[in-house]
Image: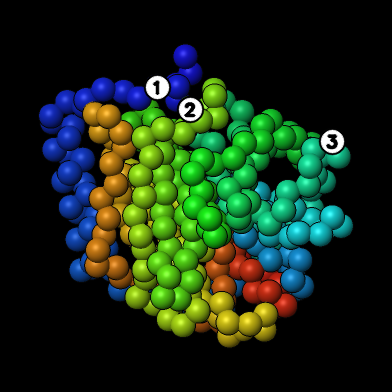
Amino acid sequence: MTKYGSIRGDRAGVKCKLQKQLLIVLFILGTLLLKPQLVSAGGWRPVRGSKPYGISGIALVRQQEDFSSFLVVHDNKLPDQGRVALLNVRGSQQPEYIPLEWPASVEMPFDLEGLTAVPGIGQPTFMAASSSGRIYHLQLDRNNSLSVLKIFDLPNIAAGSNLESFALQDIDGQLLAVYAHRGAGAEPGVIYWGVLDLAAYQLSGQGSIALEVPWPGGPVRHVSDLKVDTAGVVFVSSASDTEDDGPFQSAIYVVGAFQGGASQIQFRQNLSLTSLYRFDFRKIEALELLPGEVGGLIVGTDDENMGSSVFLSW
């Protein structure tokens, strides 16, 4: 039985109280204390300048004091276009972009939209998600060679869904999987979750909620990416997508938090959303949380004809 092969029982009463108190503090911060920061162009670093290099998902590979390495995916659809790359960021320098070859023996993915590291495993692995809900379990070796460990499909994807995110996190010894239909304008996004049995690649204890963000307006994708931190807090990026030449707008929100329960993981939604960041002229489709003293937040864009850039908050 693997660490993520079964669901734990009830937690002690004291721990439950502490978890509830933590959630209350988080929601007070999210709704009362945090003011949205309108981000200027000065903090952005260009990556590549054409449409095939738009960043649709990002995950941390390794992190040091003045150096961070990330895996990124592209939502390309043609055989000769790249799917996965490394992005190295050192100090205040421009990012180093290293394209990775997809394994010749494995089917080429179509429209990769989400990427996450797999927590709790000795050798780092990653999972990339397509817009249709197909998941690719990836491994990157020290020579930057990519291999595919498993391909599987998320269950019960509603007809017409367009997934733009996939995240994994260890919540109370359970491997939480969270993914979302992006929504469009008046159509809300939908956040789904379940517990992933990594040995069988199967989900259980599933749930979902609808999500509409207050900003940006117009043709907004309510969920363009999401990540879950180790306390269960869910960060979501939202993006307004007009045409391939823009204009674009994006925002970052805390939309709620997960906590372990007796039979399944529970989600507590934040019903009064306050944007943590607002970005003009950028379409954010990739979000990653960086822990520790030198941590922060990184976002990546798919600015269509204008290519891609990253913004680092530290």
Q: CA distance from mark 3 to mark 1?
A: 33 Å
Amino acid type at mark 3: Ser
Earlier-in-chain disc, 3 versus 1: 1
User: What is the secondary structure assignment of the residue under circle 2?
Assistant: strand
Q: Which residue is the site of mark 1?
A: 6
Q: Which residue is the site of mark 3?
A: 105
In the depicted structure, whether residue 145 falls above or below residue 248: above
In the depicted structure, whether residue 152 falls above or below residue 84: above
Question: Residue at the spot x=52%, y=27% of the render?
Answer: 198
Q: Quadrant of residue 73?
A: bottom right
Left or right, residue 51 beside residue 31: right
Where residue 204 sits: x, y (%)? 41, 32
Where residue 160 sits: x, y (%)? 54, 60
Near-viewer residue (157 or 233): 157
Near-viewer residue (45 or 165): 165
Q: CA distance from mark 1 to mark 2?
A: 7 Å
Question: Residue at the spot x=21%, y=25% of the render?
Answer: 10
